[in-house]
Every structure is written in C-alpha cells, then in structure tokens.
Image (spheres, grey):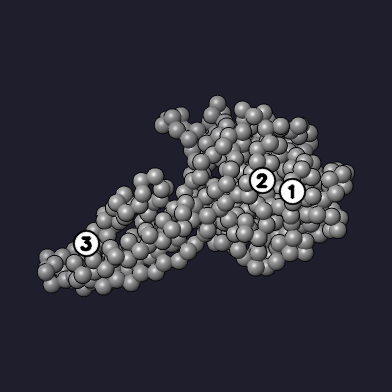
Amino acid sequence: MIIEDKRFRDWIISVRRHLHMNPELGYEEKQTSEYIASMLKEFGLKTRLGVAETGVVGLLGDSNWPTIGFRADMDALPIEEKDTPHNAEYKSKKRGLMHGCGHDAHVAIMLGLAKWLAENPHILDDAHLSALFLFQPAEEGGGGARKMIEDGALKNPKPRILIAEHMYPELEVGNVGIYESQGFAYIDYFSVKFIGKGGHASRPHQCRDPIVAACYFITELQTVVSRYIDPIEPAVVTVGRITGGTTYNVIPDLVELEGTIRALSKNIKDIIWSRIKVLLESISTGFGVQYDSSFSEWYPACINDTNLSQFIRVISSELLGEEKVHLLRPVLGAEDFAFYGPIVPSAIFRLGCANRKKGICWDDKTDSIIGLHNPSFDIDEDVLLIGVSVFLKAIEMAYKLPYFK
C-alpha cells in the first residue's frame, strides 16, 4: 500500500520544500550534504560525508546481512525559476538557481525512506537486509556517479543491487515508467575553434572569415545523421553554444562552438564523430581557415539490469495497478546512473509527477507538457509518498531476486 501517514506526509513535503528553496550546483552542495547528513545521523545511520567532494553515504541495518542500495542525486541547475500555480511558498531563494530536474524530490524520497526504515526497524530485520543510501553530487554533467565509485561508495559494504528513480512530467502522478533495458543514450562532448584572419567588414577578400566557416559547419552538420546513419538508429548532433565577434563591422579572427553527440549505440556515435572530422577538414580547406577540435566521451549508455527492471515493474503494478505502469522507450538524454551498472546490478525507473488538473507540469496556454529543465517545472508532491512506497516494496520483495538467493 501507499503510505498514508499524514505526519510523515507533512514532514517529507517540508523536506522537499526546504531543498527546493536552497538549491546548489554540482560539487557545491555543501549545505545540502550537511542537511542530509544531520538527518541521517539523527535517524541512527552510519554516515560518511565528503564522498566525491560533497556526496553523503548512509548505512542502516545489520552490516552482516546482504545490502540493498538506493541512489539520489542532489545538484540543481543554473536556471531562474518562474512562478507556478503552487510554488509561492517554496520558490528558490537563490537567483539563477533552481531544482529544475526534480533532484530535490529525489533526495526527499531517499531521506523519507531512511526515516521510515529507522522508525520501523522490523522491515529490514524481516527482510534480513541492510540498506545503503547514496546521496550523489553533480549528476548534471559533472559525472558525480563516477567520483562516488572512485571514492568507494560501493565498497564496505557492496550492495547486491542499486535502484534509483527520476521524476517524469510526461506521466501523471500515480504512474510509473519502466525501461526494460536501455534507458538513456551515450553522450559525447565536442568543441571546435575556427581560426581565420580578421579585418574590416568592407574588405572580406582580405580576410578569412571564421563566422562563415562556422555557419557552413553547423548547416552541414545536419547531414551527418540524416545521410550517414541508418534512419532507424536514434542519434542527434546538437551545437549548443557558438561565440564569435565583438562588433557589427569587424570580421573576427576566431569563432568557438560546443555541442553534443547522442546515440543509443557506441558504434553509431563513433561514426558520427568520424564524419565530423571529415567535415572539419573539408571546411578548413574550402574556406582557408584553420581549426582546432576536441572530443571527449562523457556519459556511457544507461542500461538497466533486466531482472531488476522486471522486478520494479511487478512491485509497482502491485502497488498502483498494472494500468499505471508503463514501458518506456529509450531517450537520447544522458544519465550518469549509467556508471554504476557495470559494477552492480542496477535499474532506474520514472515516477510520474505531473497533475494536469492542478496545472503542474502543464501549460494551458500552449496545451503542452512543461518538462524537466524548464523554469516552470514543478511536481505534484503526492509523488514523494509513492516513491518511498515503491522502495519499501522493493525491500520487502527483494528475496525474490536472484541476487539475494
């Protein structure tokens, strides 16, 4: 059953709102981690701070028993939050920062799970399990999961499984989304500098214009996926930043741009980068400019353990009804939960957090969803109790998984 305790509901909502009002960027979550650690210690958990700089690890239960692990990400986004129909009491207090991806809710759910287990020790005792809680920094591009692993977050004890959830405004609250296997894409980063010869706008023949070269590059970039990748293979190349020039009548010496390559297949992303290099060579020759490029593999694909995905599907169906549990297609977004998968059987699932009737994650003017990373993003706070309830059900039923045999 979904938790219906009013005292607990009021408490977990207050936690989420406190976190929402006090967002911090990746590796800057000092107040957040201190807030988390103080609660975990109050609940009686063995607690470690400073993991991956600002991460927190908590352990509850008999360490001689097998361990089940849970992960929540803590970092906020550099977004100025807008007013929503419900956030007047908990809007971000920090200009230019907000929890626009639901990480405040993720932390609140994990703290709620820790509190509920601490107050009801028979749950872990009956399951003969201990519970490991990973509060991770810098999911939003900082690779916090990798640093958590490097700092030993999955050692002493090593969990048998690791589960995480993520807010999902595409589903109404009370619904759950499951990825059977792959959930998120490979994502790589690239940057390019076009180096030309600057001069007066009236004398382009005396110059080598890096702006024109960059524009051709961005235009031709669109053919890389459309003409070199199988149409049934999901992939996308995006230039997200371009900088060049200082005034209207001067051709600059330099233009810089940055972008990402996203694909569900490693082979596909490698093909894309190889074609980009060919494109850069041809533009350099054709426009008489030089270029400097860099490329780095950012996040691997996030691939769920299939046994664990099916397990979450079953327990969610028992809690909410089969009609409330949805199989989701992989997306081309990235998720650094991917780093845990090669080390421990892992799965991430989605919690619907929208409420169209209340105007939460829904824009009536455009009749469209308000998604993640949007300045008007919000959640229906009923999702907090649902999240805790799913995790509690996972503990109760963990004995059915092969990893606890």
The answer to whether residue 331 is seen in the rendering is yes
Instruction: Give the residue pinned by disc 1.
Output: 402
- Pick the front one: 209 or 221: 221
Q: Picture coordinates of residue 244 (x, y %)?
A: 29, 64
Q: Nearer the viewer, mark 3 or mark 1?
A: 1
- In the structure shown, which secondary structural element does the residue marked by tag 3 occupy? helix
- Pick the front one: 272 or 230: 230
Q: Is residue 141 above or below residue 284?
A: above
Instruction: State if disc 2 and disc 1 touch (CB < 8 Å).
Output: yes
Tell me if 247 is positioned left or right of 316 in this view.
left
Structural crowding at the residue carrying mark 3, measured as other residues with C-alpha within 10 Å and reported as few (<14), some (14–19) or many (≥20): some
- In the structure shown, which secondary structural element does the residue marked by tag 1 occupy? helix
**What amino acid type should be assigned to the residue bearing mark 1?**
Pro
Res. 255 image quadrant? bottom left
Instruction: Give the residue pinned by disc 2.
Output: 307
**Cα distance between the residues tagged 3 and 1:** 59 Å
Q: Earlier in the sequence, mark 3 or mark 1?
A: 3
Q: Residue at position x 86%, y 58% from top?
A: 64
Q: Residue at position x 62%, y 65% from top?
A: 147
Q: Residue at position x 26%, y 68% from top?
A: 281
Q: How many marks?
A: 3
- In the structure shown, which secondary structural element does the residue marked by tag 2 occupy? helix
Q: What mark, if any, has residue 212 been given in the picture?
A: 3
Q: Picture coordinates of residue 155 (x, y %)?
A: 74, 64
Q: Earlier in the sequence, mark 2 or mark 3?
A: 3
Tell me if 279 is positioned left or right of 393 in this view.
left
**What amino acid type should be assigned to the residue bearing mark 2?**
Asn
Q: Is residue 289 above or below residue 237?
A: below
Structural crowding at the residue carrying mark 2, measured as other residues with C-alpha within 10 Å and reported as few (<14), some (14–19) or many (≥20): some
